Image (cartoon, rainbow, N blue to C red):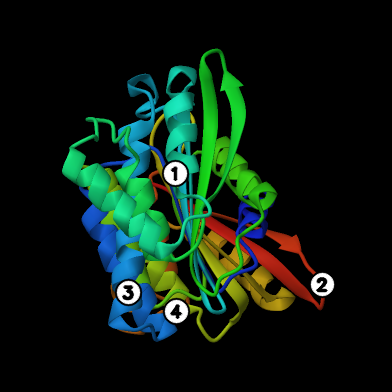
């Protein structure tokens, strides 16, 4: 994507300390990886085991709600999204998915059951519905929504917008701890950017190695047969590590579908303007070298003998059409740099 598109994605995710964004296609196998992400977030935020368990439950239930409740025709349609944000004091989990108009009365009924209810009433409601075996294959009784509200300790926030004939877009937000709900307008903008750019996964902030590991696993379960994509993503995470002492502010790593087929993996961050220019020049020089020379440089970089670093050289080696780099000027003599490889 163009550097201004990458910058718009970064700006859409600012405001917290960490953000995970996922888009279609969603796979059932990814639910286990969300538990790994909850563990990684808990380690970074110093959460108790109980809070970690609540976050893991809400993440999995919110993710499964997308898969269970959207119309079958929308399974891979690009209209669904998932965001986890960590903010001081807690977390925000936001989902977006299509809902058939015929399912709106049941959805409103499920929401009415949980909003404004105490934890004790929610527990009693959950047990009564469970004992009555009132749930349907699509979760029409709202068991998941009841438990999300009970485990998070807050009323869910939601929004419905027309999406086209016979469909609405449903946005749901659950907050945990002392987190303040994210603006629904800001969430809508983030989902719009994600959809417009074809982003299927992204991390933003100062991710820990464990959070990067969970991202790699999520993408692997999304496209398990696409080894080049996994190699490019690992190279991008290495690039983040290689530039740790040179970047300013949060970093963005994104995976997106390329128009016409294939995948792209990119990394973006702010650098001092001279360093940004050197990065662009290094990428240009790598592009002029033969494939054999790039392989030689990659082996040297693995041994610490190439100043470009292993992550940058590997991205150039793995890219099927050349690594690209561009900058966008920022304030205070900084520049946002976007590096992207097609895999």
Please state the horizontal and vertical placement of residue 192, each as a whole percent of the image: 61, 40
Q: Which residue is at 40% across, 63% downward?
A: 119
Q: Nearer the viewer, mark 2 or mark 4?
A: 2
**Is residue 313 in sight in this rendering?**
no
Residue holding disc 3:
52
Please state the horizontal and vertical placement of residue 182, each as a whole percent of the image: 62, 59
State how many labels appear: 4
Residue holding disc 4:
242
Q: Nearer the viewer, mark 4 or mark 3?
A: 3
Residue holding disc 2:
331
Please state the horizontal and vertical placement of residue 305, each as a whole percent of the image: 37, 84
Give how far apart the Cα atoms at labels 1 and 2 are: 49 Å
Q: Which residue is at 21% across, 45% downward?
A: 130
Q: Secondary structure at mark 1?
A: helix
* Res. 180 image quadrant: bottom right
Q: Mark 2, residues whose alpha carbon is within 10 Å: few (<14), some, or many (≥20)?
A: few
Give how far apart the Cα atoms at labels 4 and 3 are: 30 Å
Relative horizontal placement of residue 136, taking residue 261 as reference (left or right)? left
Q: Earlier in the sequence, mark 3 or mark 2?
A: 3
Q: Earlier in the sequence, mark 4 or mark 3?
A: 3
Q: Mark 1, residues whose alpha carbon is within 10 Å: few (<14), some, or many (≥20)?
A: some
The reply to whether discs 1 and 2 touch (Cβ–Cβ < 8 Å) is no
Give how far apart the Cα atoms at labels 2 and 4 are: 24 Å
Q: Nearer the viewer, mark 1 or mark 2?
A: 1
Residue holding disc 1:
113
Q: Nearer the viewer, mark 1 or mark 4?
A: 1
């Amino acid at each position: 994507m163009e550097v201004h598109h990458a910058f718009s994605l970064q700006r859409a995710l600012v405001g917290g300390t960490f953000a995970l964004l996922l888009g279609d296609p969603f796979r059932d196998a990814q639910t286990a990886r969300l538990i790994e992400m909850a563990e990684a977030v808990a380690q970074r935020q110093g959460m108790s085991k109980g809070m970690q368990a609540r976050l893991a439950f809400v993440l999995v239930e919110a993710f499964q709600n997308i898969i269970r409740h959207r119309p079958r025709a929308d399974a891979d349609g690009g209209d669904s999204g998932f965001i986890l944000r960590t903010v001081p004091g807690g977390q925000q989990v936001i989902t977006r998915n299509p809902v058939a108009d015929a399912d709106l009365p049941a959805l409103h009924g499920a929401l009415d059951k949980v909003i404004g209810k105490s934890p004790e009433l929610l527990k009693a409601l959950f047990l009564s519905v469970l004992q009555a075996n009132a749930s349907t294959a699509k979760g029409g009784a709202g068991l998941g929504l009841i438990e999300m509200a009970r485990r998070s300790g807050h009323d869910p926030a939601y929004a419905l917008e027309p999406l086209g004939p016979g469909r609405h877009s449903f946005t749901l937000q659950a907050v945990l701890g002392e987190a303040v709900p994210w603006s629904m307008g800001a969430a809508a903008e983030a989902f719009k950017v994600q959809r417009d750019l074809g982003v299927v996964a992204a991390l933003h902030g100062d991710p820990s190695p464990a959070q990067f590991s969970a991202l790699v696993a999520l993408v692997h379960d999304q496209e398990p047969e696409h080894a080049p994509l996994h190699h490019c993503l690992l190279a991008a995470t290495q690039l983040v590590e290689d530039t740790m002492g040179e970047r300013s502010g949060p970093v963005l790593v994104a995976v997106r579908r390329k128009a016409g087929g294939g995948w792209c993996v990119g990394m973006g961050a702010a650098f001092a303007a001279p360093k940004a220019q050197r990065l662009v020049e290094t990428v240009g020089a790598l592009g002029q070298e033969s494939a054999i020379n790039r392989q030689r440089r990659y082996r040297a970089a693995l041994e610490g003998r190439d100043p470009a670093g292993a992550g940058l050289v590997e991205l150039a080696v793995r890219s099927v059409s050349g690594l690209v780099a561009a900058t966008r000027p920022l304030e205070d003599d900084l520049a946002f740099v976007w590096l992207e490889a097609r895999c």
